[in-house]
Amino acid sequence: MSIKVLGTGFYVPPRAVTNDELSQMVDTSDEWIMQRVGIRERRVSVDETTADMATKAAKNALVSAGIEASELDLIVVGTISSDTACPTVAGMVQRAIGAKCPAFDISSACSGFMFALETAAAYVARGNVKNVLVIGAERLSKLLDWKDRSTCIIFGDGAGAAVVTKGEGYLASTMYTQGSDEVLFIPDVVGSSPFYERTEKPRFVYMDGQETFKFAVGRIARDVKEVAQKAGITLDRINHVVTHQANIRIIEFASKKLKIPMEKFFVNIEKYGNTSAASVPIALAELHASGKLKRGDIVALCAFGGGLSSAACIIKW
Ligand code: COA
């Protein structure tokens, strides 16, 4: 298809919050979180905005790609934790790195980076643009209820980025949306309008963990099979699976369902937790930096989350 990955980069804020530290705040334990979710610690931004983190990831991706910000034709950011409704995170990154191209955000929760990648591929296929900076960046820590043990233990902050260009490395893709606010709900900021009618909706992130779990396992298996079929490859040809890091048990279930061994799944959930739209690009950038990705490798990327939404694609490295 239309694009190939030129370079990747990521950034996570320095403040690590361990499970032991969380156990001082809510009724939980390192043992429970490690067993049920697989997270040991997560990074939390103390003073960096989503755009600050996105900018650092972007700069690293530009270095990795070996191109200048002035060579970018488009910037697309997947995020649900924009610092402001306007300007966008993408706009602030554009200014910070000194790019001149159009820039906009896409909102699709944890699938946000994948939706942004598909958008980049569509623009390149149209012939309008050549080089696109695609970012997933989140500061979900500011939206969480830190007294709710079912959500505050799961999420972390960070940003991941990829520079893509015209090429033949994007073999197949799929996107899925199942509109729902019952399973996963993330609130928006409400001003002080006297005309605004309050609803019964919770003010903080709400998640039905078990329903999300079922949705995730089902979608990863279905989406990866679908894109492999579209790309004309069998599942055993896949060298690496870079999936959204939401729960180690979800990844293990997906491995079993797809009959793709766990060794092929890149896993970094223990260090960063679930960084929403930043999760897949951080994992891809770490895999890239590890030197384990070889030219010609087949990589399956997949994500799922609020919306509800999911997406997957097959990349030839
Ligand atoms: N620490 C300790 N105990 C906890 C806890 C915590 N942080 N959270 C819940 N519990 C307790 C529950 O109260 C319950 O206790 P009970 O048996 O006495 O009633 C028990 O642990 C089991 O709770 P349950 O909700 O059934 O746990 P679970 O195995 O489903 O794990 C999640 C909960 C959230 C970790 C899991 O459902 C999950 O990861 N879901 C997917 C979430 C996801 O992917 N979200 C991101 C989407 S992008």
Image (cartoon, rainbow, N blue to C red):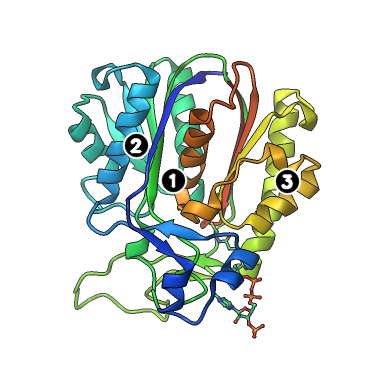
Q: Are marks 2 and 1 in contact (CB under 8 Å)?
A: yes
Q: Quadrant of residue 130?
A: top left
Location of ligand 1 given as a quarter of the image: bottom right
Viewport quadrant of the N terminus: top right
Tag of residue 22: none
Badge 2 is on which residue? 57
Depth check, front residue: 221 or 26 = 26
Q: Nearer the viewer, mark 2 or mark 3?
A: 2
Q: Secondary structure at mark 2?
A: helix
Give me the C-alpha separation between circle 3 and circle 1: 21 Å
Q: Amino acid at mark 1?
A: Ala
* Total tally of numbered discs in the picture: 3
> Is 101 placed left or right of 255 in the picture?
left
Residue at left offset 29%, top offset 49%:
50
Q: Earlier in the sequence, mark 2 or mark 1?
A: 2
* Position of 5 relative to 12 (above/below): above
Q: Secondary structure at mark 1?
A: helix
- Nearest the camera: 112 or 264? 264
Disc 3 target residue: 221
Residue count near mark 2 (Cα–Cα under 10 Å), binned few <14, some 14–19, many ≥20:
many
Sequence-wise, the earlier of marks 2 and 3 is: 2
Q: Which mark is residue 278?
A: 1
